[in-house]
Amino acid sequence: MKNKKIVFSFLVTFMLLIIGSVAFAANPVLMERTYAKSSKIIGNDSYYANTVKSITILMNNTVPNDAFVSWDISESSNGSIKAWIKKNSIVNGTQMYDLYIGGSGTAIVVKKGSNLFRGYKNCTTIIGLEYLDTSDVTAMDNMFYDCNSLVNFNLDGFDTSNVTTM
């Protein structure tokens, strides 16, 4: 698969095949995150990683009606993984957001973990990390770089058996 250039690249590239008793079912593949210094323009507002208060990963890619903005973050641009934000609160005059990442399969597979959550310096919570399949990841360097406020997250489900760079 070709990596695609996007206006707001968000996360990491994924691909996983789940072997069933007779058939194969593909989980959605997330595009590689390359957005460290870019933003998503929303009307007169700009959404930056540092304006996120929480991140929630779900196995449901249906964007709710109260989402402020949403976009496709699947590697194949087929809508199998979507991101959306909802307004949170205003802190010191800056609009803060909650970020949601929703997949349509049984797992969201990470190919590259490097810089995955980099720059979310005001994010305090990441929920749903157990939905990320990290079994094929070889690099996790800077995965949580500059996440200075992060206090609530659980890495118990992370498979680091193939990781060579942390």
Image (spheres, grey):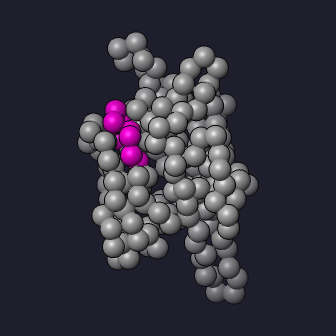
Measured as percent of width and height from the top left, residue 5 is found at 65, 50
- Compared across the picture, whether 21 is left or right of 145 comes to right
Q: Looking at this rendering, what residue extends furthest in the top direction?
A: 93
Does the magenta run of residues contain 123?
yes
Quadrant position of residue 65 = top right
* Image height of 13 relative to 115, above or below: below
Q: Is residue 22 left or right of residue 85?
A: right
Considering depth in this image, is 131 or 164 the residue closer to the camera? 164
Residue 45 sits in quarter: top right
Residue 25 drawn above or below residue 92: below
- Residue at image position (48%, 59%) is 131
Residue drawn at 60 percent across, 27 percent down = 41
Could you tell me which residue is drawn at 68 percent across and 79 percent down? 24
User: Magenta region: which residues?
Assistant: 117-125
Q: Position of residue 30 (x, y in %)?
A: 58, 57
The percent position of residue 82, horizontal first and vertical second, equals: 62, 47
